[in-house]
Structure formats: C-alpha cells, structure tokens
Image (cartoon, grey):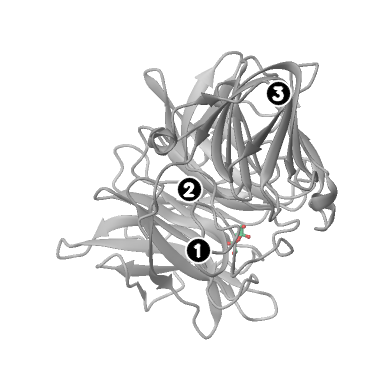
Amino acid sequence: MENAKAYPKFHFCPKSGWMNDPNGLMYLNGQYHMFFQYQPFSTEFGNMHWGHASTKDFIHWNHLPIALYPDTDGCIYSGSAAEIQTENGQNQIMAIYAHHGYDPEGTESIHIAFSLDKINFTPYEGNPVIFMPQYKYFRDPYLFQCPNETFWRLAVSTGNMILFLVSEDLIHWNETGRFIRKEDDIVGLWECPQLCRVKYEDTFKWVLIISHGMEAENGGSRTRYFIGSFNGYTFIDETPGSTSKWVDFGPDSYAGAFFRNTEDHPVFIAWMSNWAYAKNIPADGYRGVMSLPVSVSLTKENEFLLSFQPVSNLLKVFSEPQPLPDQQVAALPDAVCLEISAKNGSVAILKDIQGRELLCFGIDSDGYIFLNRSGESARTIPHFEGSFTSSIKNCSDHMCVFIDRNTFELFANGGHSKCSALFFSDSPLILWFQDMKIQKRDYTAISED
Ligand code: FRU
C-alpha cells in the first residue's frame, strides 16, 4: 500500500500487515539486512513471523520474502542473527529467536534456524535449543561475542532480568551470569536486550540496552541504556544507582537494536511506536514504521552518555537548506528536514491546515527540550496524549527535525537528546514558530519502486 496517504518516504514500513520490533539486524556484503516482527495477514498484532528487508543506503529498501513462519505450536518472537559457517565451510545465516507458544501460558523457548541463501530459513530439527520453564518470559535472545573469543554468548530477557549464556556450538548453552537491578522502580517488562562495545577515545565500553514494556517513566514503553563492562560472565553497570538513561525522550522509540558488523560506528534502529497505543493508531493497509537509523557514539563529560545522529548518508537525499521567512508561519511538505537554531523559551507548533495542533516542541526557559502531543488530534487515540521533556539540559542552539508523513524525529544537544513521536493528520502541514531560525531541506530522493 505504498500510495496509502501516510506511507513514509524515507522510513521503512511494510507494504501491508502489522510490524513491530527490528530483529536479526546485520551488515553483510554491502547490504544491511533487517528482519522484523511481522504479521502479514492483518494490521493487528498476532501470529508473529519474521519479515525481511535489505538496503544499501537506508533510504531504498528491498522488501524480501518472509524469513520465519509460525509452526503448529507457536509463533516467532524477537531475536538476533549472525553469519556463521557450515561444517563444510559455507557461509550461512543463523537466526536465534523466541518461540512463543500457542498454549494458554504462551510458553517461551529459544529456537534457531539456518539459511544458506539468506532468504529461505529452515528451523533446526532439534529445537528448542534452550528451554527454562521456570521463567514465564524467556525471550528476545541477543547473540554476541567478546573480542578474541571463538565461542558465542547470548543475552536473554526473563521479564525482570537479563540472563547471560555461553555456547561453543550454538546449540548447547550454559548460564554464566545475570544482570539484575535492585534499585529499580517499576519500569515494566524487560525486553529486547542489546549489547554492544562502543569506542571511546582509545578504549571501548560495553553498552547494554533494555526495552521496558508499558510501565516505563513516560507511562508507556521505553528503552534505556547502561554503560559498563562485561566481565566474562555478566554485564557490570559502572554507575549503579544513577538515574536511568533513556535512548529517546519521546514516546515512540521501542525495541531498538544494533546492526551486527557496524561496531566501529554502531548503527541502531527502533520501532516507532509504543505498546500503550500501538494497536489503536490508524492503519492504512499497514501498521508500523521503523525509526531513522542512527549512528551511536559515546561521549564523556561528568559521565558517559550515548549520542545519536542520523546515519551520515541520510542528508544526501535532502535539498540544500533554504531559510524559512521569519514570518512565524510556513507551509511544510510532508517529507522534510528542518535545521533549527533555537534558544531557551523558543517554541514551534506543527498544525494541520485546519489549524489543529499536532505537536508542539521547543526549549523551555530552563534549557530543557520538550515535546507536547496534546492537541485535538492526539485525544482521539487512547493514551496517545502526553508531554515529554529531555532529562539532559540543552547546551547547543542547533536542533534537527525530520518529518516524514506521520513521523517526527528531533535530534538536539549534540545527539544526546533525541525525541521520536508519531502524529496523525491527512491534511497539509503548517509550522508556527517563535524565537527560532529555521532552514528547510526538502526530501529529494526518488523512490526506486
Ligand atoms: C517487544 C516484544 C518482544 C517480543 C515481541 C513480540 O516489543 O514484546 O519482547 O519478542 O515484541 O512481537
């Protein structure tokens, strides 16, 4: 349904059906492969498969055949993948994922599947490879390796902790350790762990990312990160007790994951939605969109923080910046990038042509970036309304906003403050702004399809 009114121009969406988490991300032979949680037959969540797409540039995506199908006992939840060698030296992809049972308990176990052609997968006949019935939730296995090790490691979420396991043959797994947080308030179900070594000057830090369903700080689902080390058994948070650090201060960034083999400049992509209302947002033949892919880096002032910037080739598909007249109101195309220079107390309101407020954003008088989604259009979707403020004080006057049909992504504060939000309107967009200088860059790339 690419001509559906809201089909984004420079974001990945399935052509039809329901999509949530990115899965099994990897860079391989010049292509970025993305698998994803997918229900092909309906725009409602359920009966999950792994969809598959690939891209060379993160703008033009090839929609590939479904990679993994449910079996008679259950369906395919999130997981990861890696290229490995067969016994006779051929390259193949191994996917490792949670099998979610159709039984009343929704029993979860870890399964694997192999693909020689990187398109068609065959589940391993000895599945499950890990079954720990003591855990009701046992999902989202994330496969990783430590430097100079030949064996594989796995991080699996049990709902309120991350279990680490190790294996020499990817089939037999033994537990090595657990990551638990005693100091947590309620943050909701732990899901989708990701572990990545990120470079800082001439050393590396391990970053652990955990997504939290439903009860995170913003009242919905949200993704946080920890910075530390991996001691061979488990992840060690180097600042235990410090306030939680969130990947995105907006409402619509969840289950974010790293592309394997991009470790020099890790690339991360997330599902742009929130379990608080994902099932209620308008569907137009498809439901679900991925965020812009971002490059992740580490910075340190008082403490280590992650910085997120849109991948570098993204701006190549936008026109040169043209200043918006200082008239405080401008018509906007539905796919655009705005380079904004803003100071404390500045504000912008995105409206539709009927004058209905969609989103309001700016920098408050104390120097915190905010986003309000509380206009009339937000009130029609239960739990969609909200106000969101960055936890880090802003110390840069530059912000960059990408709007693509119904997606809004703001990057500010040198990449330390990122805000992702959906909005819904069928009408042309108007931007009203105050105390901001804005340069507009139109989306210029022509779709290959
Ligand atoms: C996260 C999640 C995962 C699960 C998948 C099911 O959004 O709940 O924990 O594997 O979605 O689609």
In the rendered image, the quadrant that contains the C terminus is: bottom left
Quarter containing ligand 1?
bottom right
**Left or right: 225 as drawn, with respect to 278:** left
Q: CA distance from mark 2 to mark 1?
A: 12 Å
Q: Can you tell me whether the CB of the residue at mark 3 lies under 8 Å from the nearest atom of ligand 1?
A: no
Identify the residue at image location x=47%, y=57%: 23
- Rendered image: mark on residue 71: none
Tell which circle, 3 or 1, labels the residue nearer the N-terminal end: 1
The answer to whether the residue labelled 2 contacts the one labelled 1, judged by CB atoms less than 8 Å apart, is no
Q: Which residue is mark 2?
A: 10
Q: Judge left or right: residue 293 versus residue 152.
A: right
The crowd level at tag 1 (other Cα within 10 Å; few <14, some 14-19, many 20+) is some
Name the spot of residue 285 as percent of width and height, x first: 59, 70
Residue drawn 48% across and 59% down?
A: 79
Residue 254 appears at what percent x and percent y?
62, 49
Q: Nearer the viewer, mark 3 or mark 1?
A: 3
Kind of element beneath mark 2: loop
Marks 3 and 2, how far apart in space? Answer: 28 Å
Q: Amino acid at mark 1?
A: Glu
Whether the residue carrying mark 1 lies under 8 Å from ligand 1 is answered with no
Residue under label 3, please give it.
327
> Toward the viewer: 362 or 173?
362
Q: Secondary structure at mark 1?
A: loop
Q: Upstream in the sequence, badge 2 or badge 1?
A: 1
User: Residue 341 at what x, y percent from top left?
Assistant: 62, 18
Gap in Å between the C-alphas at discs 3 and 1? 35 Å
Mark drawn on residue 2: 1
Residue 283's quadrant in the figure? Answer: bottom right
Q: Earlier in the sequence, mark 3 or mark 2?
A: 2
- Residue 226 visible in this rendered orientation of the protein: yes
Q: Callout 3, which amino acid?
A: Gln
